[in-house]
């Protein structure tokens, strides 16, 4: 079984970030088993940023290294006296990067050799690519790449020869973009990045034997790189002799340093973050070469004619994450609507209940103030509006009232009767607490759409299953007491006691008036108790005394007195009986007015207050919270929809989707889609939109990014090769035509792309990443090399950078500089001073 393996060696912090992006991509696309990652770092890495399987080789300052560094300043030509070895990093000084590599070269050599042996199975691997990745405008990578490439070539070459493996050593990195199409860009905040870029490019013209800033291509070999900084006690090699280019290819990406400086160093979103998009571009270029169908030997000897290439990349993507968000938020919105509908129904019920209880209380207060009763409100249609259960039981309540023996009923018995004829209320607090508990059971912060739906169903069931908010039992009790009061009033109005008192008073008007003149207009009870009863009792006593004083022999007189006494006592007994009966009714009526009915009214008011409190809580807490959530979800839904139909103006374009079609398809349709063609068939993606997006990606974002200062004597036509990274079923996407018969490939010629690189399908069914690899790139045609050289020759670099620019101090490999190169000492320019920046 033959395998292809890829060893990624990142150098410096910028290189590590690019490698981390590549690590993410290879794992997202199911290629993780092909790759191994090593980081050579001179600064501490954040443990959270380091992938678990990445091997870190840390080259950090210690006392011995610092002592060695100071000793070498006087002896080594590339270590300037003004350089300082920082605690971490190379501080944008390539000579410090070279020093750390040489000083720790045995650690690097042994680590890479060991990792290579553990990663590559010699009996199953037939191809091995090794990549050096870093920023050539910094200090660590710029200072290490020339020597490290020779060192790694020796390690990999030795291992490959031993096991008959086809090896290739490549490098990819960024350089600082100095000028674009003769329009000067805003320079970044650290001038040394442009200095280091120029130095790195000059060194690589020698290392790779390609034309320099003068357009010349002298044969530099052999080139000897002595390792002056290596500790005497730990030297694997005294020097490296380079007889041919150590790199099979160098991929360069020029970047806007100001945008890099301002971009966040956190996050892995290449769509939004410029720094991460740079990392993604290089990572995509590495992927396009490592996943080629052709063998590595053919790639570097036949497919590509030059060792120097530049890179540009663009991507067209179906925003499935946004689609998922769209569906998720749509479902969440529907669920929230369901919950809000239930709560609003409950709100309406509470409002109606409060209104009905208020109307009942208003009527009760009105009749109380008028000290009268009115049975109109007890009519069945009025009761029906207040309480259907009470209205349906009205006949039984009336029958109970009619059957009462009011003259003999006690207050306690009356309350017992009331309890017997009404259904007891579910206590408002208890019932509302049960509903509230249903609300509280849902933790909104953690709730998903299904939780919301379940919650709405439970809440609706709980509310519908409970008694409604009307206190039917209390209304029935009020009705019962009011009917009893009405019956008492009726009986008091026609009671025999009143008739008897009035008749007696009329019959004995003269006597009663003389006896109690102030009682003529008094009530029956007062007339009886203060006048009639005392008069009858006095009369009884008088007759009784006369009889006792009448001799027994006067039988006739005594009999007459006896008859008169019996008549008075009988009359008094009737009066007392009627009086007791009447006053009992009056007492019962007063108890109703002063105790029972007020208690019921208090209960009604408390119930009304509880309903108002619940209504306020419902509005200000539950409903407000859900409405706020709904507003947030609606905003997120609108945003997701805009992202589906919108576009990205940078090199990563989101394919506009037909959101109308989403109303007709299910999320399962998207889950089952295996490639872009399936989405076109489902109507989610329009083929015209796909073709147009690919054409725009090619036309707007794929061009040779480095050449911008063309030399008249050179061939100014770069040659591009296009790689398409996507699922194998999408590989014909560039051949698709729109309704006008145009395809994306037609745009390639205008971008100097004249051939395609066959790339294996990767696990990226809804992404189409276009990588352009440009050859025939002459550094003589670049501002980064020739323009800075011209500025240096005429002595205006300091004016350009608004600072003194120390080229000589930052040159780590003077052995790789040809005569007359930028930064070579010029006696007319005087002493070179230290640069600003780090």
Image: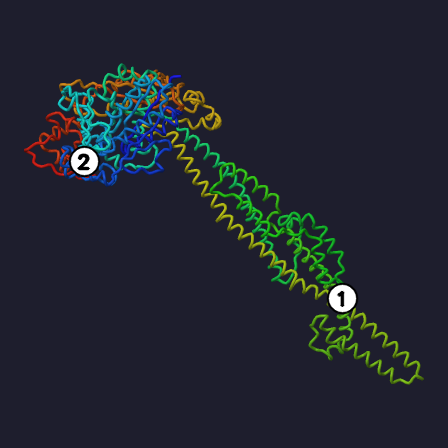
Q: Give the left or right position of residue 236, taking residue 383 as reference.
A: left
- Return the x and y of residue 215 as percentages of the image width and height: 14, 21
Q: Which residue does the numbered mark 1 point to in the structure image?
A: 581
> Where is 458 relative to 256, above or below?
below
**Is residue 138 something that shows in the picture?**
no
Label drawn at residue 191: 2
Q: Nearer the viewer, residue 647 or 759?
A: 759
Q: Give the left or right position of residue 410, taking residue 747 as reference.
A: right
- Return the x and y of residue 192 as percentages of the image width and height: 19, 35
Identified at 66% across, 48% down, the residue is 389
Q: What element carries label 1?
A: helix
Q: Which colour scheme is used?
A: rainbow
> Where is 532 relative to 764, above or below?
below
Give me the C-alpha separation between circle 1 and circle 2: 114 Å
Quarter that holds the C terminus: top left
**Is residue 200 something that shows in the picture?**
yes
Q: Which of 272 and 345 is in front in this view?
A: 272
Do residues under tags 1 and 2 come within 8 Å of each other at their CB atoms? no
> Where is 733 relative to 78, above or below?
above
Q: Is mark 2 on a helix, strand or loop?
A: loop
């Amino acid at each position: 079984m033959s395998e292809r393996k890829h060893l990624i060696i990142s150098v410096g912090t910028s290189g590590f970030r690019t490698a981390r992006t590549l690590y993410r991509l290879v794992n997202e696309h199911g290629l993780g088993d092909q790759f191994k990652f090593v980081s050579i770092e001179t600064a501490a890495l954040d443990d959270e940023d380091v992938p678990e399987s990445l091997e870190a080789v840390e080259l950090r300052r210690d006392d011995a290294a610092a002592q060695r560094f100071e000793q070498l300043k006087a002896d080594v030509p590339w270590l300037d006296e003004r350089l300082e070895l920082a605690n971490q990093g190379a501080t944008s000084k390539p000579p410090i990067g070279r020093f750390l590599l040489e000083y720790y070269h045995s650690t690097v050599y042994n680590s890479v050799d060991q990792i290579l042996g553990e990663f590559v199975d010699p009996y199953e691997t037939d191809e091995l690519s090794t990549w050096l990745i870093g920023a050539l405008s910094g200090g660590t990578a710029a200072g290490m790449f020339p020597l490290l490439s020779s060192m790694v070539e020796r390690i990999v070459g030795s291992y490959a020869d031993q096991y008959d493996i086809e090896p290739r050593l490549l490098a990819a990195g960024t350089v600082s973009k100095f000028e674009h199409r003769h329009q000067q860009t805003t320079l970044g905040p650290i001038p040394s990045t442009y200095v280091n870029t120029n130095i790195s490019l000059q060194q690589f013209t020698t290392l790779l034997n390609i034309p320099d800033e003068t357009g010349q291509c002298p044969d530099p070999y052999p080139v000897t790189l002595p390792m002056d900084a290596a500790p005497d006690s730990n030297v694997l090699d005294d020097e490296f002799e380079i007889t041919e280019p150590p790199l099979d290819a160098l991929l360069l990406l020029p970047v806007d340093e100001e945008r890099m400086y301002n971009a966040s160093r956190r996050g892995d979103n290449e769509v939004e973050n410029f720094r991460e998009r740079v990392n993604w571009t290089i990572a995509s270029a590495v992927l396009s070469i490592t996943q080629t169908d052709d063998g590595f030997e053919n790639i570097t000897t036949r497919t590509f004619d030059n060792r120097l290439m530049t890179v540009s990349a663009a991507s067209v993507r179906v925003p499935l994450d946004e689609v998922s968000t769209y569906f998720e938020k749509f479902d969440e919105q529907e669920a929230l609507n369901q919950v809000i509908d239930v709560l609003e129904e409950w709100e309406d019920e509470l409002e109606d209940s409060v209104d009905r209880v208020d109307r009942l209380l208003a009527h009760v207060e009105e009749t109380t103030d008028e000290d009268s009763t009115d049975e109109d409100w007890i009519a069945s249609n009025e009761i029906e509006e207040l309480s259907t259960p009470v209205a349906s039981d009205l006949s039984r309540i009336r029958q109970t009232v009619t059957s009462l023996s009011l003259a003999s009923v006690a207050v306690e018995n009356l309350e017992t009767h009331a309890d017997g004829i009404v259904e007891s209320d579910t206590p408002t607090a208890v019932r509302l607490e049960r509903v509230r508990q249903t609300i509280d059971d849902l933790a909104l912060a953690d709730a998903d759409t299904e939780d919301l739906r379940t919650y709405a169903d439970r809440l609706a069931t709980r509310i519908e299953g409970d008694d409604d908010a009307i206190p039917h039992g209390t209304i029935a009790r009020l009705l019962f007491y009011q009917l009893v009061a009405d019956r008492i009033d009726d009986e008091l109005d026609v009671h025999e006691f009143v008739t008897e008192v009035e008749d007696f008073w009329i019959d004995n008007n003269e006597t009663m008036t003389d006896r109690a003149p102030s009682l003529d207009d008094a009530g029956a009870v007062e007339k009886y108790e203060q006048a009639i009863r005392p008069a009858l009792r006095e009369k009884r006593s008088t007759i009784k005394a006369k009889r006792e004083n009448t001799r027994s022999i006067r039988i006739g007189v005594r009999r007459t007195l006896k008859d008169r006494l019996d008549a008075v006592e009988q009359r008094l007994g009737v009066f007392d009986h009627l009086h007791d009966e009447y006053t009992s009714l009056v007492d019962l009526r007063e108890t109703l007015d002063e105790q029972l009915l007020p208690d019921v009214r208090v209960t009604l008011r408390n119930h009304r207050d509880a309903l108002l409190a619940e209504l306020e809580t419902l509005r200000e807490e539950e409903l407000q919270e859900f409405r706020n959530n709904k507003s947030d979800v609606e905003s997120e839904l609108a945003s997701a929809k805009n992202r589906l139909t919108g576009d990205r103006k940078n090199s990563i374009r989101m394919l506009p989707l037909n959101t109308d079609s989403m109303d007709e398809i299910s999320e399962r349709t998207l889950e089952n889609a295996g490639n872009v063609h399936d989405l076109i068939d489902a109507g989610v993606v329009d083929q015209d939109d796909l073709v147009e997006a690919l054409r725009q990606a090619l036309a707007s974002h794929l061009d040779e990014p480095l050449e911008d200062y063309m030399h008249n004597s050179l061939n100014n036509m770069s040659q591009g090769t296009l790689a398409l990274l996507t699922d194998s079923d999408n590989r014909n996407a560039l051949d698709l035509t729109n309704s006008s018969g145009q395809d994306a490939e037609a745009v390639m010629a205008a971008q100097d792309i004249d051939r395609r690189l066959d790339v294996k399908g990767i696990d990226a069914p809804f992404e189409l990443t276009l990588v352009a690899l440009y050859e025939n790139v002459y550094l003589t045609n670049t501002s980064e090399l020739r323009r800075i050289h011209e500025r240096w020759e005429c002595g205006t670099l300091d004016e350009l950078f608004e600072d003194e620019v120390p080229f000589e101090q930052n040159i780590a490999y003077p052995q790789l500089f040809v005569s007359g190169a930028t930064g070579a000492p010029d006696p007319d320019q005087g002493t070179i001073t230290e640069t600003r920046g780090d």
